[in-house]
Amino acid sequence: MPSSIKNVIIVGAGGKLGPNLLSAFDADPSFIVSVLARQSSKSTFPSHIKVHRVGDAYLQAELLEALKGQDAVISTIGSAHAIQQNAIIDAAIQAGVKRFVPSEFSSDTHNSNAVAILPEYFKGKLETVDYLKGKEKEGLTWTAFVTGPFFEWATQSGFLGFNLKEHKATILNHGNDRWSTSTFSAVGSAVKNAMLIPEKTANKYLYVGSFTISQNELLASFEKATGAQWEVTHLDAEIEKEIAVEKKSQGDYGGFVSLQRYIICVDGHGGNFLDYRENARELLSLPKQNLDEVVEGILKD
C-alpha cells in the first residue's frame, strides 16, 4: 500500500471541476500541487502554481518528465478523451507515482441500463478503471470517485431543467425519483481528503454526494429561496428519451445532454447511487451540507 502522498499533479485543471480540485489541494499545507496542461490549452492558473506543459499527443518522454517526483495524479480529462488516460497511467508507473485518480466523477458507471443508453460516455470510464486494475501489480494504486452531477453547474446551466432567472422548471414525469449530486467544494474535499488516508482509499470506488433529492424537492428549495411560485412544465421522460436518441443519432449534442439528464433523474439508471451504495462521507470527513443554504448561495452568484 502507498505511503504518504505529498506531491499532487492535476490533469485538466482548467475545466469545470479542475479549479475546485486545485484550490482544495492548494489550501492544504499537507500537499504541494501542480498542473499538467497541454501546450494548446488556453487555461490560466494562479502564478504560484507550477504548470507542466506537454504536447497534445501526450508523448511518453514529456509525460515522464512532468510526473517525476509526483505521488498522485488526478485526472479530469473529458469522457470523450478517456483513452488518453492510458498513456498518462503508463508514464505514472514509470515515474514511480503511487496513486492515480481517473476522470470518473459521474453517476454509477456500473449501472447496465445507463451504459446501454450512453455507452460512449460510460464505457471509457469503465475501461480506464479496468486498465488501472491491471496495473495494480506494478505498484500503482487508484481511487475512483462517483459524485453525480456537479450541483452548481447542473442547476445554473439549466441541465436539470431549472431556469433560475425566469423562475421556470421542466420536470420529468412526476418529479419524485431521487438522484445524488455533489457540490464542487464537496468533490474537492473528497478527493483531497482521500489522499490524506491513502491506505484506506486504495483500489476502490468511493461514492460521495452532498444530497440525494428529487426534482420536486429541488423545486421546493428554489421556491422557498425566491419566495415565489415557479412555472412548472411536466414532460414524459420516455418521450423525451426517444427525442433525445433521435437527436443524438443525427449528431445533435443536445440529445446527448438530454440522455444524461434522463439517466440521472429517472429511477433504474444509477442516478440515486447513494440509496444503495455506501456513502464515503464519514470516511472522508466531509461535513453535511444543507440544501436550502446551498441553493441560496447559488441564487446570490
Image (spheres, helix red, strand yellow):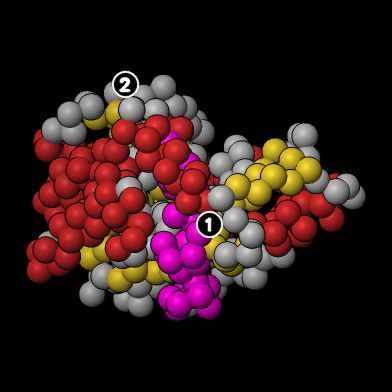
Q: Is 124 placed left or right of 131 in the picture?
A: right
Q: Quadrant of residue 66?
A: top left
Type of amino acid under label 2: Ser
Q: Residue reaching furthest right?
A: 227
Type of amino acid under label 1: Cys
**Magenta residues (range):** 255-282
Residue at which label 1 appears = 265
Asked which secondary structure carries label 1, the reply is helix
Asked which secondary structure carries label 2, the reply is loop
Q: Is 166 placed left or right of 112 in the picture?
A: right
| Residue 13 image point, x, y percent | 42, 39
Any magenta on residue 2? no
- Residue 139 visible: no
| Residue 187 image point, x, y percent | 50, 57
Residue at the spot 88% in from the left edge and 47% down from the top edge: 228
| Image quadrant where one finds the C terminus | top right
Residue at the spot 52% in from the left edge and 51% down from the top edge: 237
Residue at the spot 32% in from the left edge and 48% down from the top edge: 118
| Residue 24 image point, x, y percent | 52, 52
Residue at the spot 41% in from the left edge and 51% down from the top edge: 32
